Image (cartoon, rainbow, N blue to C red):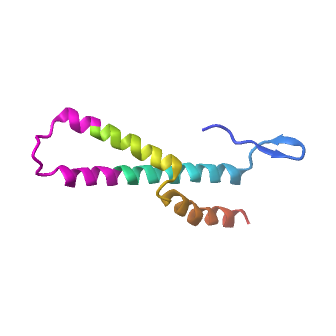
């Protein structure tokens, strides 16, 4: 993870502990959203293709899983579902409370 540098009146300053913790929390909540969306897509696909007219091939399943992972990763990065933002808002209060 790249180092976060705060800019103050005297120029760049080393990151304070709370800023690093908030950045890590933001990253973790985005990864959680990506994971959740990925699992959702996989479960939706399983229910949609179960008992279908076409046979399921291993190659098709592999590429479909890769596509689901890519879509989930993008959704997580963008926070499109809002899960990451909600988790972050709830958990950042604990970090701020510890600093007081």
Looking at the rendering, the stretch of residues picked out in magenta corresponds to: 39-63
Residue 64: x %, y % from top left? 28, 39
Viewer-nearest residue: 3 or 82:
82
Tell whether position 55 is magenta.
Answer: yes
Residue 88: x %, y % from top left? 57, 60
Q: Is residue 31 left or right of residue 49?
A: right
**Image quarter hosting the C terminus:** bottom right
Residue 29: x %, y % from top left? 51, 54
Viewer-nearest residue: 98 or 75:
75
Q: Is residue 4 left or right of residue 60?
A: right
Give the residue at x 64% y 37%.
2
**Image quarter hosting the N terminus:** top right
Residue 11: x %, y % from top left? 86, 41
Give the residue at x 57% y 66%.
90
Tell whether position 58 is magenta.
Answer: yes
Q: Is residue 85 left or right of residue 100?
A: left
Give the residue at x 27% y 54%.
44
Give the residue at x 34% y 39%.
67
Q: Predominant secondary structure in magenta?
A: helix
């Amino acid at each position: 993870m790249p180092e976060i540098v705060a800019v103050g009146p005297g120029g760049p300053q080393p990151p304070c502990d709370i800023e690093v913790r908030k950045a890590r929390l933001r990253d973790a909540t985005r990864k959680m959203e990506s994971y959740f969306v990925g699992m959702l897509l996989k479960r939706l696909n399983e229910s949609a293709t179960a008992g279908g007219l076409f046979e399921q091939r291993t190659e098709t399943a592999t590429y479909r899983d890769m596509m689901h992972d890519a879509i989930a990763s993008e959704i997580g990065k963008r926070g499109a579902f809002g899960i990451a933002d909600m988790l972050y808002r709830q958990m950042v209060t604990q970090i701020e409370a510890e600093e007081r």
